[in-house]
Image (cartoon, rainbow, N blue to C red):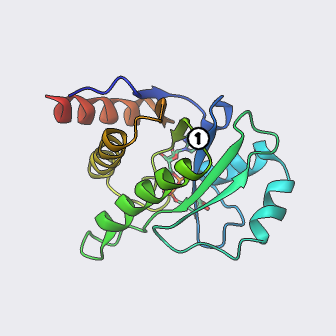
Amino acid sequence: MNDPRITIMQGDITKMEVDAIVNAANQTLLGGGGVDGAIHRAAGPELKEECRSLGGCKTGEAKLTRGYQLPARYIIHTVGPIWKGGQHNEDQLLAQCYRNSLKITLAKKISTLAFPSISTGAYGFPLERACRIALQEVKAFLDQNPGIKQIYFVCFSEKDLKKYQEAFQTMSA
Ligand code: AR6
């Protein structure tokens, strides 16, 4: 069934006015390219200072920081798996990224959250497969947690947006 608390949209996640945005980071948590670079640039240098104190993050795990100059109050940094052909636990690790990010929302009373398409850029995870995992995890979480008001999937490109919409329709049918 379609869940009205899920919104799929195209845009720049750094502009989202939500309680928290999720960052597709790397294990150092010290910044990088893609969405990670965009978030660090938009949040400002204080973000790196806080990240430095966190001691990195394992693949599949998630850690919280403040949002600094972002409209979002918090950033949840998670590290997606690097795609190595699909036989290296990639699906489970990606699912864990979503699950662990969502778990953090409970402790901080975050009710609106925006996800980028974790692992599908530099880390090469096939988009269709990744967005099925993303939607599945978010739907399962929403079923258990009525306190969450809205979850946004923020697609950077039109191509990604179409894939997400297709996956959502298929899974809702
Ligand atoms: N808003 C929303 N989505 C974005 C934005 C943005 N401003 N910018 C890029 N994307 P990637 P990964 C999309 O490569 O695959 C970094 O260097 C992008 O089009 O950012 O998890 C980290 O430090 C793609 O759909 O993340 C790691 O080293 C999606 O975000 C590594 O890349 C994810 O692409 C992580 O790779």
- Residue extending farthest to the top is 4
Q: Residue at x 34, y 72 (%)?
A: 84
Residue 160, given in percent of the width and then of the height, sits at 39, 37
Is 159 left, or right, of 55 in this rendering? Answer: left
Is 69 left, or right, of 83 in this rendering? Answer: right
Residue 19, by quadrant, is top right
Q: Secondary structure at mark 1?
A: loop
Is 167 left, or right, of 90 in this rendering? Answer: left
Quarter of the picture containing the N terminus is top left
Rendered position, 12 above or below 104: above
Q: How many tags in the picture?
A: 1
Label 1 crowd bin: few (<14), some (14–19), many (20+), radius 10 Å = some
Residue 24, by quadrant, is bottom right
Rendered position, 105 above or below 155: below
Q: Residue at x 24, y 75 (%)?
A: 87
Q: Nearer the viewer, residue 1 or 40?
A: 1
Residue 119, given in percent of the width and then of the height, sits at 44, 57
Residue 134, given in percent of the width and then of the height, sits at 35, 47
Rendered position, 108 above or below 81: above
Quarter of the picture containing the C terminus is top left
Residue named by callout 1: 110
Q: Nearer the viewer, residue 124 or 10?
A: 10
Residue 52, given in percent of the width and then of the height, sits at 78, 70
